[in-house]
Image: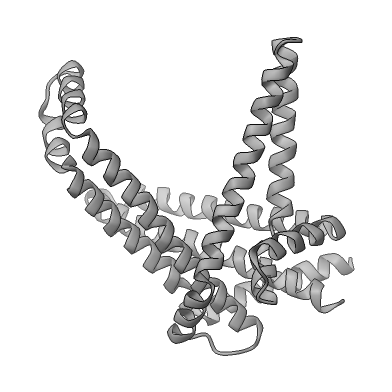
Amino acid sequence: MILIGIYLEQYKKAWRSLRQHKILFLPDLLSFLAILLLGWLAVSLSGLFPLISQVPSLQTEEQASKVITAFIGQNFGELIVSIIGFCIAAFVVGSGMLAAKFGLIRQILSKKQPTSDIAWTWGRAFFWKVVRMRLGVFLLYLGSVVVCGILFALLQFVHQVFAAVITMLAIIILTALLLLGLFMRYPALYKKNMSVSEAIKTSYSFFIKNKQCVVMTAFIIAVTTLVVKQIFEVIMTISLSVSGKGAAIVAVIMSVLMLLVMMGARIFGDLYTFQIYEHYKAKK
C-alpha cells in the first residue's frame, strides 16, 4: 500500500507539473517543426517533388514502377546524400531538444522556474552528453543484435527450429534488460552531471537494487500513454463521424490535437521517470 501511495503521489505530481509548466512542450514542438523543415529540404534537394507529383497521374503500377526505377538510377547519389544528411541533422536537432527538455525538468524538480533561457542553457551544456548517450545506447542495442546473430549462427548447426527459439528468447531477454537497465539513464545523467558511462552504470545499478520500481514505472507510463491514445482516438472517430461536410477540416484539427496529446503523454513519462528517480535517491 505504501508503494502504491508513492506511485500515485508522483503520478499526480507529474500531471500537475505538466499543466503548470507549458514550456515543457517547447522543445518537442521545436523538434517536430525542425524535423518537418529538414524533411522538406531533404525531399527538395533530392528532386523527389517532381516525381511525387508525376506518379499519381500514371495509369498502371508498371508505369509507376518504371518511372520510379529510372528516377532512382538517375538520382541515386542525391538520394543517398539527402537521406544521410536528414538523419544526421534530425539526430542533432533531436539531441539538442532532449537536452533542453530534461534541463527544464531538472529545474522543476529543483523547485526553480523553467524558462526558455534555462532551456537554452541546459541544452547547450548537456548537448554533447546527450549525443554520446544516444550513440552509446544505440551501440548497446546493436551489440545485442550482433550477439543474437552469432548465437543463431552457432546453434543452427544443431537444429534450426531450436536455434530460432533460443535466439528469440535471447532477443526478448536482452531487449528487456537493456530497456529496464537503461531506463533511468537520463535522470542519473542530470542528477549529478555524470559522464555518460557513469550514468549508464548508475542506471543499471539502480535497476538491480530497485527492480520493482523500474518495472512499475515503465508499466505505468506505457499504460497511461496507451489509455490516453485510445481515448483520443475514440474522440477523433466520433468527431469525424458527426462532422459531415467539414470532415476534412475536423480531421486536420484533430490530427494537430492528437500530436499535442501524444507530446503531452511523452513529456508526462519523462517527468514521472525523473520524479521516481529523485524520490528513491532522496531516501538514501
Q: Is residue 237 above or below residue 165?
A: below
Residue 79, picture quadrant: top left
User: Residue 150: image x %, image y %?
Assistant: 67, 26
Residue placed furthest toward the bottom = 112
Q: Nearer the viewer, residue 53 or 68?
A: 68
Q: Indicate left or right for 87 with 213 as reference.
A: left
- Does the image show residue 15? yes
State how many labels appear: 0
Question: Which residue is more in the foreground, 215 or 242?
Answer: 215
Residue depicted at x 82% and y 65%: 4
Res 258 visible = no
Q: Quadrant of the rendered structure where residue 8 is?
A: bottom right
Residue at the spot 67% in from the left edge and 66% down from the top edge? 273
Residue pictured at 15% horizontal, 35% vertical: 51
Q: Is residue 79 left or right of residue 187?
A: left
Expressed as whole percent of the image width and height from the top left, the position of residue 195 reads 65, 68
Residue at the image point whose x is 44% and y is 80% from the top: 120
- Indicate whether 263 appears above or below 150: below
Q: How is the image coloured?
A: one colour
- Locate residue 81 relative to residue 107 in the image: left or right: left
The part of the image, by quadrant, that contains residue 75 is: top left
Q: Nearer the viewer, residue 106 or 60?
A: 106
Task: Give the x, y percent position of residue 239.
Answer: 37, 53
Quadrant assignment for the C terminus: bottom right
Which quarter of the rendered picture does the N terminus lie within? bottom right
Q: Position of residue 183 (x, y in %)?
A: 69, 57
